[in-house]
Structures are given as C-alpha cells and as structure tokens.
Amino acid sequence: MTRGAQRRRLSPPIAIAAAVALAFLVLPLVALAIRAPWGELPRLLSSEPVLQALGLSLLTGAITTVLCLVFGVPLAVLLSHSAQWPTVPRRLLRAAITVPLVLPPVVGGIALLLLLGRRGIIGQLFAQAGLGIPYTTGAVVLAQTFVAMPFLVFAVEGALGAADRRTEAAAATLGANRWQVFRMVTVPLVAPGIAAGAVLCFTRALGEFGATITFAGSLPGVTRTLPIASYLALQTDPEAAIALALVLLVVSVVVLLALRDRWLPGVRA
Amino acid sequence: MKRAGILLVATVLLTGCTAPAPEAPTRPAALGGTVTVFAAASLTAAFDALAAEFEQQHPEVDVVVNYGGSSGLATQITEGAPADVFAAANESTMARVVDAGDAGDTTVFTTNTLVLVTPAGNPAGVTGLADLANPDFAIALCDPAVPCGSAAQALLDTAGVTAAPDTLEEDVKAVLTKVQLGEADAGLVYVTDAHAPGVIVDIVYVPEAQEVVNRYPIAVLTGAPNPDAAQAWVDFVLSDAGQQALADAGFLAP
C-alpha cells in the first residue's frame, strides 16, 4: 500500500509524541520481562496448573477463532453491505458490533449471565434440560467469542472495503450464483484480511479475563484459563503471576509475528 | 517527634471518642490530608459506616478505602502501593506484609465466621455442608489461595466433606454474587457478607462453622504517607464506636 509513497522525515513533534506513545506501550512489557524470575521459570511453567491453564487457553482460543470465522465473516459481509442501507439501521448495526469491543468485559460477562446463565432468559431452558451453560468450557468459548468477534468483523470489513468489488460483479455476470460469488471470489479476495482478523481474534480470546470469570467461573482444567490463573497467582505468588503473564505475552507475540508476516504480504501484493 | 504526634493524636482521639457529640471540641490540628485504607472485601459495609463517622469527627481528613481480596491487597502493598493502613481477613495474609517489612505491630480487631448461603428461597433444597459434595448442585467457593477460601477449606475439613465446587472465585463478594444471581445453588461466605445491606440470600445453619474463625488483623504500614491519620484510623477501629460498627455488620469481638 505504501509502495508509491515517497519517504519523508516526520516533523519533530510528531516523532516525539509517537516515541512517547510507543514507549508507553512497550516499556511495561519490558519491565515484565526484566522482573520475570528467569531462573525459576522452568519450574514455574512446567507445573501442572500452568500447563493445564495454557492448554485450556489454547484450546478455547482456537475454538473461539473458528466460531468467529464461521459467523463473523458473514457478519462482516452484512456490515459491508449495510453501506447501502438508510442511516439509522446502518448506524445501529455498526454500534451493535462495536459495543462488545468497548464494553468492560465484566459487564459483558454479566450480560451473558442474564441471557445464558442458569436463570438467564434462554439459559434457564438449557438448565431445565440439565445442560447448564455456566461453569463449562463451552461457557469460556462463548465469553471469548463475545469479546473477540468484533475484532474479526472489523478486520474483514476493512478488507472488503479496500477490495476491488467489481470482480464480484464480473463473476455474477459470468453466471455464478451469490453463494458461489461469496465462496470463490469474495473470500479469496479478502483472505489476508480474514487471516489478520483471525489472528487478532485468537490473541484477544487468549487474553480474555473479565467476561470469562464472570460468566464461566474459575475451576482448574475446566474454566480457569491462563489470564485467570495469572490473576489468582498474583494473590499469593507474584513471581508465578509474572511467569504466567510472560507466557501469555510470548504466545501472543509469537502468534502475531509468525502469522501476520506470513499473511500480510498478500495485502501489499 | 512522630511518636509524640501519634500519642497526642491517640489521646485526643480517645477523649474524642468518649464524647458522643459530633462536634468534638478537641479537634486535632495535626490531622489532615487523606488516609488510604486497604481493607478486605468483607469489611466493606462496616468500614464504609466507620469512614463516614471518622470523617465527621475529623473534617480535615479524607478516608479512602480500597476494598479487595486480602491477598491481592497484600501483594499491592508489598509492591509499593501508597497505603496507610491494611486490614486483612486473616493473619497469614497480614504476615506476608509484615515479613516484607511493610508493617510493624498488628492488632486483631475483629473475627468472622463462615455461613452456607443459597439463593433466596433455596430453590435447590440445600440442607448442609454435605450438599457441597453433590455434583448435581452448582457450588461456588473462594479459591484456597485467598482467606475466605482457606477458611472454607478448613471448615470442609472439619466437617469431613470433600466439596465438588463448580467455580473457585477470587474473593468472597464474587461467590456471593454468583449465589445471589442464582448461578450457584450454594456457597460459603462470611456471615458478615450474608448480612450485608442489600444482600438477599438464604442462610443455612452449619454448626461446624463456629469452630473455624477468621481473625482480622489491622496495622499502620511502615511506608504510610500519612502515619498520624493512619494511627487515628486504627485507634478508631479499635474504639468502642468502631467495635460497635463492626458488631452491627455481623462481626464478632476479637
């Protein structure tokens, strides 16, 4: 995207402010790395509770990402389509997708309880059938999906907006039906955007805390994901908490670096 | 000099406490600023009431109470949080702060016991501690890493019950919330939380609960930014008025 742009020096105020912003984002993580009990790390990280929490986080994060892809990409298409709608419904749709993004996750967790909890509007039907949703790994996935879905939707919507949509029209004139156009033209067209959204979605799911502990609870091996284990460790063993936080940080950075470098060249090509 | 100041404050306070009139004539000139109290979540109702009373007696002092799980508060203090006073829900948590050199003398100012609570009306028909082992019930307990959880564990051990919890929460208020919302059929919370204003739960009498007592210590922190007001607050909590407010909230004498 920046290929034709000329390289210009930034004006000093912008460079300084940007440096402050970057330092503010990076330095806390550097402090985390400096304060990490490196010598103790192998012992802390190979303990059963940590491995259990890490495994649960990776599993639920992966399922969440799949769910977000299956339902979020179509929602992004709808959002993109809504550009043709009248103002009010268009803005309502965008607001509905944005709210989980800006809502405190604990509030999201309470809202999920009121809908899907054992006494929730829909959840009580499940509970009566003996399928209570809270306190299950499925509830963790639901909480993560609630907070992570908007990341994917907006990433894909952005890609749809930037893509050359005339290809779709061309495919349609060549006799493709709407499903074929979506599957064979639209999805490949915005694949890099989908991949970038999926990565964001996965890392956000990995870090989810508030909605999970509120809606799903916290039980080792079932609902206690890495961020919850990390928070609880902070109560008694700050070194262990730092170690757990470091794991989350490393996993997120590795995922972001590995996947984005692999996929993002596609955007520029 | 600091000690003299504390003595003066203590003397003034003692005389101030015996006089019920809100406008005590011996308003100490030395007290002012903000006193930051880190307190166990279970103290919320009692300390809110006490803070209002304290501020009435000392209009120059602003009491700010940070409520939370004792263990988390202890970690914040040992990491350098600028607090004046720490009131913990058990002695082992306070010991961590003392061991780190962040508090000197501690005083046990009140005690608390656990009760078994259910949502209003006890829809699941929970009758006693033994039901906490029933996997068909949704059970919320505190994690053993926090004081209410270690107390719960001690109580369950005393009763010879192996609980089947569905969630191990990070503090007692989270357990209470789960029970109040009906998301848990039963949970163990402090008796004070069960009686807190606005809390609607049913209490199931558990005889063993009287044997497991949480002792709450309080201390002025060594790094207190406002040590005089901090000592005044501690003295106030230990005074008759303070003990009365704690008793009103369901706490027992130390």
Image (spheres, rainbow, N blue to C red):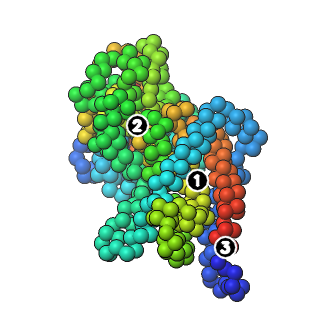
Between marks 2 and 3 in the image, the one whose residue lies nearer the viewer: 3
Q: Mark 2 and mark 3 in contact? Answer it, CB < 8 Å.
A: no
Asked if both marks, 3 and 1, belong to the same chain, the answer given is yes
Q: Is residue A172 visible?
A: yes
Residue A248 is left or right of residue B62, and the answer is right
**Residue A123 placed where, x, y %?**
33, 39
The residue indicated by pointer 2 is A134
Classify mark 2: helix, strand or loop. loop
Q: Are marks 2 and 3 on the same chain?
A: yes
Mark 2–mark 3 distance (CA, rounded to whole Å)? 44 Å
Q: Quadrant of the C terminus of chain B?
A: top left
Image quarter of residue B47:
top left
Residue named by callout 3? A268
- For label 1, the residue is A203
Chain ID at mark 1: A
- In the image, A3: left or right of B164? right
Q: Is residue B246 above or below residue B80?
A: above
Q: Is residue A201 above or below residue B68?
A: below
Q: Amino acid at mark 3?
A: Arg
**Would you say B180 lies left or right of A75 here?**
left
Mark 2 and mark 1 lie on one chain; the one further toward the N terminus is 2
Farthest front residue in view: A175
